[in-house]
Image (tube, rainbow, N blue to C red):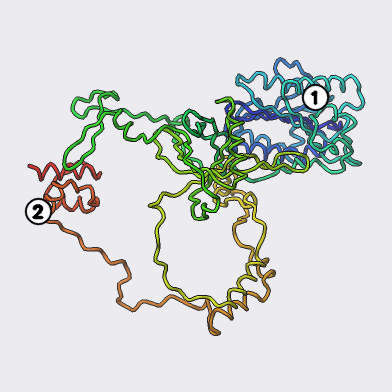
Amino acid sequence: MGRESSCGPYYQLRTQKGGNCIVGIPSLSSQELTSHLPKRRLDVYTSKIISSDKDLVALVFYGTEQSKNPRNSFKHVYIYHDLDLPGARRVQDVDGLRGEKGAQVAGETMGSGNTNLGEALWCCSNLYSDIKLRLSHKRLMIFTCRDTPHGGDGERDRQARTKASDLKETGVVIDLMHLMKPGGFDVSLFFCDVVSPPEDEAELGLQMEPCGKLEDLQKRVRAKEMKKRSVARLNLCLGEGMNVAVGVYITALQARKPNAIKLYRDNNEPVRTKTRLYHTQTGSLLLPSDTKRVQVYAGRQIVMEKDEVDVIKKFSDPGLELIGFKPMERLKLHHHLRSAVFIYPEEEMVTGSACVFTALLRRCSERNVFALCKYTRIRNSPPRFLALVPQKEEVDDGQAQIVAPGFHGIFLPYADDIRTLDTPQLPTASESQVDKMKEIVHKLRFKYRSDAFENPVLQQHYRNLEALALDLMAPEHIEDLTMPNVNMMDQRLGSLAQEFRDLVYPADYNPEGKTAPKRKPGEFCGTEKKPKVEMSEDELRGHVQKGNLGKLTVPVLKDACKQFGVKVTGTKKQELIDALTAQLTK
């Protein structure tokens, strides 16, 4: 344990199905390892369980006395966790490596030996090469507290540089996550030839502070990672015989709690549900071709085939159809019904789509117009009207793209959705009251960032699950950032709040002193029960003849069945209607 060695690499690779594969290779002896790295590995484990449930995680130590790897072909390399999904057991194992007690346990289990970064990188390469999945993204992050891991051994340095070069040729992105070192960490001594070229060349020199990327690993925000992919790939029809392939992307998606999964009691495996239809009289299994669709209309059962139902549901083929162009002044703020979608060309589907799409985008931007289109996402979805608002490309000083070119698809309302409301007549504020409120609003303004406020309900939900899985005494405390900071608001406003109160409310007004009026003794406190609506037989027969039973509510239909002594086998609305119809048509 007295030998100081480097704290080795993590690598992260993304599979075609969206899963990640993370492998950590630290050593055991340094102070940074025993105090910080186990905590960061624990944060990686817990965050990956929630953010992406298909992630594979492994933990490998190097610079150890003991060796544990396939066939022990790599000396001083200890595979602590093989590639698998990060579960509660693994999180508890990593948590046991924290602190002085954890360092002692690690020393007794693995010990401390020589360091060979090339051997560790080779072991990493074998780990994810054994995965029987097609890999689309691979990333390797090296954690170290020594800028010369081999102490000047030229042969080992050469082997590590060669293996790192081989990994980069296979598409692996190697990042350096250096820790604190007295006197600074000099990347130029060794790791500048190992890691991939960074965006800032200053990162290759002497670093006096730890790598800033380490803060990302310590974030305790629990968030589900969403796949950045198109929700639909459609044809944009510009005219007869003129189609352009485009992709539709969602710009904003509401985060929700994950759906509950039913588990089998004996083995805790997910339950798979299968639905089969059986004949009520013979009990024989019914095939899809044996069933019909029925719609009751005017007391008659209209039988339809499945193909006929599909034709009824179909409005148009999926795609975007250009209707025309409108000036941007015609698009109002109240026309935005929901979050917009982003339209981008798909050159792989139709060659030349990007060229035509760019010309259309440029022309709409120059003339300050938006394109009006009919949008059908899937076969059986109703068509919607979209206003395609052009967005030009924006780049920063380094010519890096910060805003992509394309169209924002604004969902427009139908004519029936726009109604004229009779607004109530309310007292009008005076000019002095309006001016005072403008001052208050100006004082309370701040630059809003959506990623600065986490949903407290979701964060508490994930921490409750974490505490339950890890057998913790209590879940981790969270800070509700959505609650207003009253002290800061009072400091900014000063006397403005009292001045506004004096302008609007009377002198003796006390909002905290008002109480609800007490009810008098004997006064009924509950809600008044609505009288039962009884219907005559003639009225009910008239509804049956006209086929209007479906307009009645379920409680009214139940009361009618009890009133006329109609026996029903269920409580669904259609069953009640069928029973009443059969009774009154005899």
Q: Quadrant of residue 577?
A: top left
Numbered marks: total: 2
- Residue 524, label in figure: none
The residue at 49%/42% (across/down) is: 324
Mark toward the viewer: 2 or 1: 2
Q: Position of residue 301 (x, y in %)?
A: 19, 36
Q: Nearer the viewer, residue 229 or 98?
A: 229
Q: Position of residue 188 (x, y in %)?
A: 89, 32
464 horizontally vs 298: left or right = right
Q: Residue furthest bottom?
A: 507
Q: Are marks 2 and 1 in contact (CB under 8 Å)?
A: no
Evaluate whether residue 299 shows in this view.
yes
Q: Residues within 10 Å of mark 2 (few under 14, many from 20)?
A: few
Residue type highlighted by circle 1? Glu
Measure how far apart labels 2 and 1 are at the Cα level: 94 Å
Q: Nearer the viewer, residue 368 or 79?
A: 368
**In the structure shown, which secondary structural element does the residue marked by tag 1 occupy?**
loop
Figure check: 399 above or below 110: below
Which of the marked residues, 2 or 1, is nearer the chain's N terminus? 1
392 horizontally vs 244: left or right = right
Which residue bears the numbered disc 2?
538
Residue type highlighted by circle 2? Asp
Figure check: 453 above or below 115: below
Q: Quadrant of residue 180?
A: top right
Q: Position of residue 1 (x, y in %)?
A: 83, 32
Which residue bears the numbered disc 1?
65
